[in-house]
Image (spheres, helix red, strand yellow):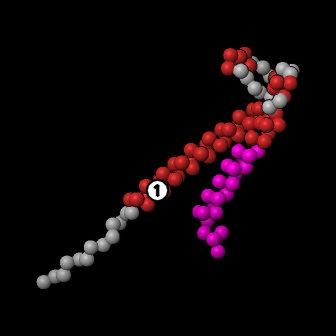
Amino acid sequence: MSAQPALSAPLIDWMSLGKVAGVSFVFGVAIVVLFSVGIIGVSWMRGHDYPEANVSAARDLDDKDVRAQGPEAAANQPLGATLAVVCFGLCAAAVLFGLWLIIPQFHR
């Protein structure tokens, strides 16, 4: 008579895999959104602030024409610089944290 094998734990913990996939998806989307908002900040910093009605006309303007638009376009420059620095800084921090998680020598 042969003994029956003992029941073992499942090979894959599906709940943990689902959690990892969900968190990875959320943070992946968050990094893309942060980078996109940072690009908007750079655009504001350079003085590009287009109303929706003038988007097609504003695309044809060069930087000299945008600076000549007056104080309305210049008002968003400090806000745009701050927004860009914060968003790009958070993106860089997320990349560095990911590298820290991946590289085992950093965990010693």
55 left or right, relative to 14: right
Residue 83: where, in percent of width, then height? 74, 41
Q: Confirm whether the magenta stretch covers residue 43.
A: no
Residue 12: where, in percent of width, then height? 37, 63
Q: Confirm whether the magenta stretch covers residue 99.
A: yes
Other residues around mark 1 within 10 Å, as few (<14) / some (14–19) / many (≥20): few
Position of residue 3 relative to residue 82, above or below, is below
Where is residue 94, by image quadrant? bottom right
Query: What residue is pinned by disc 1?
Result: 19
Q: Callout 1, which amino acid?
A: Lys
Look at the numbered disc 1 and give the secondary structure of its residue: helix
Q: Residue at x 70, y 45 (%)?
A: 87
66 left or right, relative to 31: right
Query: How many dots with numbers?
Result: 1
21 left or right, relative to 4: right
Position of residue 51 relative to residue 30, above or below, is above
* Numbered range of the magenta stretch: 85-108
Q: Residue at x 80, y 31 (%)?
A: 76
Q: Residue at x 27, y 73 (%)?
A: 7
Position of residue 16 relative to residue 60, above or below, is below
Residue 11: where, in percent of width, then height? 35, 66
Q: Nearer the viewer, residue 76 or 4?
A: 76
Where is residue 15, by image quadrant? bottom left
Position of residue 42 relative to residue 10, above or below, is above
Q: Nearer the viewer, residue 73 or 55?
A: 73
Task: Identify the image quadrant of the N terminus.
Answer: bottom left
Task: Identify the image quadrant of the C terminus.
Answer: bottom right
Q: Residue at x 51, y 48 (%)?
A: 25
3 left or right, relative to 104: left
